[in-house]
Image (cartoon, rainbow, N blue to C red):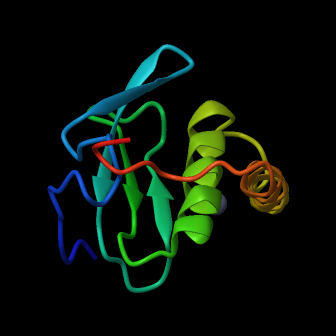
Amino acid sequence: MRILIALSLLVFGRLSAQDTVIVRGLPWSVVAVEMDSTWGMCDDPATEGREIWIDPRLSEEHELEIVIHELLHAAFWDIDESVIEQVAKDFARVLWRMGYRKQDEKG
Ligand SMILES: [Zn+2]
């Protein structure tokens, strides 16, 4: 399933693919991976070396939604997929309308 790992700052702005994020006290590696059947993936929080995969081919607005979606899975592993999907869409739409965008490295 893992086709390409893009270790580039350009993919996630200031967040390098080697960087970890903390969700509910647990570290997660955020990795750019091109996938066949989904735009994002989140490991079970009980997994050692937890990873969140984000497809680097996403548009900026859709990436925002998918990042929120996978972070919600990381934070609330037992919540139903349909709830995660709706809340991620809602949050992404609000943040996008408020003007949140990625900054380049100079920004
Ligand atoms: Zn999901």
At horizontal 38% and vertical 57% (from top left) the residue drawn is 53
At horizontal 65% and vertical 60% (from top left) the residue drawn is 65
Q: Position of residue 39 (x, y in %)?
A: 49, 72
Classify residue 62 as left or right of residue 28. right
Q: Position of residue 49 (x, y in %)?
A: 26, 34
Q: Say which quadrant the N terminus sits in.
A: bottom left
Classify residue 62 as left or right of residue 76. left
- The residue lying furthest to the bottom in this view is 36
Please give the count of numbered marks on the rendered protein: 0
Q: Nearer the viewer, residue 35 or 62?
A: 62
Q: Quadrant of residue 79?
A: top right
Q: Position of residue 37 (x, y in %)?
A: 47, 84
Classify residue 74 as left or right of residue 15. right
Q: Nearer the viewer, residue 54 or 57?
A: 57
Q: Position of residue 88 (x, y in %)?
A: 74, 54
- Up/down of 46 relative to 10, above or below: above
Classify residue 13 as left or right of residue 24. left
- Up/down of 35 relative to 54, above or below: below
- Up/down of 1 relative to 60, above or below: below
- The residue lying furthest to the front in this view is 106
- Up/down of 35 relative to 106, above or below: below
At horizontal 50% and vertical 77% (from top left) the residue drawn is 38
Q: Say which quadrant the C terminus sits in.
A: top left
Q: Quadrant of ligand 1?
A: bottom right
At horizontal 41% and vertical 61% (from top left) the residue drawn is 54
